Amino acid sequence: MGLGGGGAGGGGGLALLVPPTAALAVGAVSYSLFVSQWLPFRALDHLLPAGDYAGRPLAVRLVVLAAYLLCIALTALLLYWIVEKPAGRWLRGLWRRPAPSPADLTAAPARSPR
């Protein structure tokens, strides 16, 4: 069953709230998000320690939370565009190369220059 609770293609639940393009975008960068979330979290925890805002008004805490989420999302997007997408293109290029034919494998090896 998917997020919507209606099974494959059934819709309903969260599927009504989240547009398919947004769900696909989050799915595409999910690994980058998983891998990179610690870096902005640590940096922001050093700059804006969450404990310092415990007694502050809700609006201040929401702004700090928004800053954390924005930095984590931007870091994940950068990692996706700079590392994950180029690596995927490179790997797909490796798999698309034609396999050597049997004639190529049995051909006489090239002579080494003397």
Image (spheres, rainbow, N blue to C red):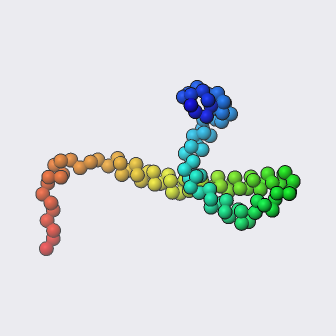
Count how many numbered circles sit on residues in the image.
Answer: 0
The answer to whether one can see residue 78 in this image is: no
Residue extending furthest toward the bottom: 114
Rendered residue at 14%/54% (across/down): 107
Tell me residue 102's x, y (percent).
18, 47
Tell me residue 105's x, y (percent).
18, 52
Q: Quadrant of the N terminus?
A: top right
Tell me residue 101's x, y (percent).
21, 47
Q: Report the front residue among 28 and 56.
A: 56
Rendered residue at 40%/48% (across/down): 92
Rendered residue at 67%/56% (across/down): 71
Is 52 left, or right, of 76 in this rendering? right
Q: Quadrant of residue 55?
A: bottom right
Tell me residue 53's x, y (percent).
81, 59
Is 101 left, or right, of 97 in this rendering? left
The answer to whether one can see residue 7 in this image is: yes
Is 98 left, or right, of 56 in this rendering? left
Is 57 left, or right, of 82 in this rendering? right
Rendered residue at 13%/74% (across/down): 114
